[in-house]
Image (tube, grey):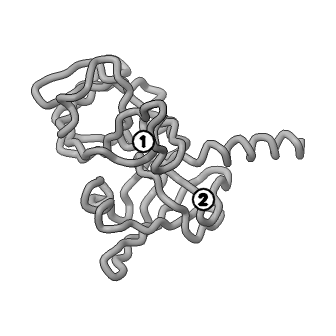
Amino acid sequence: MFTGIIEAAGTITTVEREQSNVHFTVRSPISAELRVDQSLSHDGVCLTVVALGEGTHTVTAVQETLNRTRLGNWEVGGVVNLERAMVAGGRLDGHIVQGHVDTVGECTEVIESGGSWYYTFRYATDDLLVDKGSVCVNGVSLTVVEPTDDTFRVAIIPYTHDHTNFRELRPGSSVNLEFDIIGKYIARQWAAYRG
């Protein structure tokens, strides 16, 4: 379980394929504090640390994860948002994030506005967003602005822009999206009720 509050940005140093799995090694300020078997959110994807190096950690993505997220497009030099799992009894500063990506979206617009930024994203899935509700974009807990049937916007403050990979996003960039778990449960119950 995560909160969507990014601890650090890491840089991908190696990408190794082993049959259908891919091993990613990431250098980050928190890698030295990790342990093997620990869950860690990488751009919103919950992955298990399988090895540690000098200031690096390695995680493995299976084919299902590669199919459902943008990890299949990761390359050496890419910047990744990182968050360790929430500690029981800790503050929930963002919202409840599982690290289970629902779909991949596309950035369609970036607008600078008085020192902050508005990002617009397009996605193809059931409408699970509400205005001022929560969404997780590349592991970042954000507030939904102006949702439509297939797009939504988020407002990014300078701190988030400078300390996450949002600074790398351009129109055409793909992002991992996880919708609010409460909204997903309500949508499922409503679909069952309507039959």
Q: Residue furthest left?
A: 54
- Front residue of 141/138: it is 141
The image quadrant that residue 107 belongs to is: bottom left
Element under disc 1:
loop
Q: Residue at x 43, y 26 (%)?
A: 63
Q: Position of residue 174 (x, y in %)?
A: 40, 53
Quadrant assignment, res 40? top left
Q: Give whichever of 22, 29 is nearer the camera.
A: 29
Image quadrant occupied by the C terminus: top right
Q: Nearer the viewer, residue 3 or 181?
A: 3
Residue 5's place in the image compared with 54, above or below, is: below
Query: In which quadrant of the rendered view does residue 62 lie?
Result: top left
Q: Secondary structure at mark 2?
A: loop
Between circles 2 and 1, the one closer to the viewer is 2
Horizontal and vertical percent for residue 108? 44, 66
Q: How many marks?
A: 2
Per the image, the residue denoted by label 2 is 133
- Residue at screen point 22% across, 42% down: 10
Amino acid type of the residue that numbered disc 1 sits on in the rendered structure: Gly
Question: Among all residues in the image, which is located at the extreme bottom?
Answer: 114
- Crowd class of label 2 (few under 14; some 14 to 19; many from 20; radius 10 Å): some
Residue at the (30%, 77%) spot, across then down? 115
- How packed is label 1: few (under 14 Cα within 10 Å), some, or many (20 or more)? many
Q: Amino acid at mark 2?
A: Gly
Residue shown at 45% from the left, 43% from the top: 91
Please determine whether, in this image, residue 44 is positioned above or below residue 61. below
The residue at which mark 1 appears reads as 44
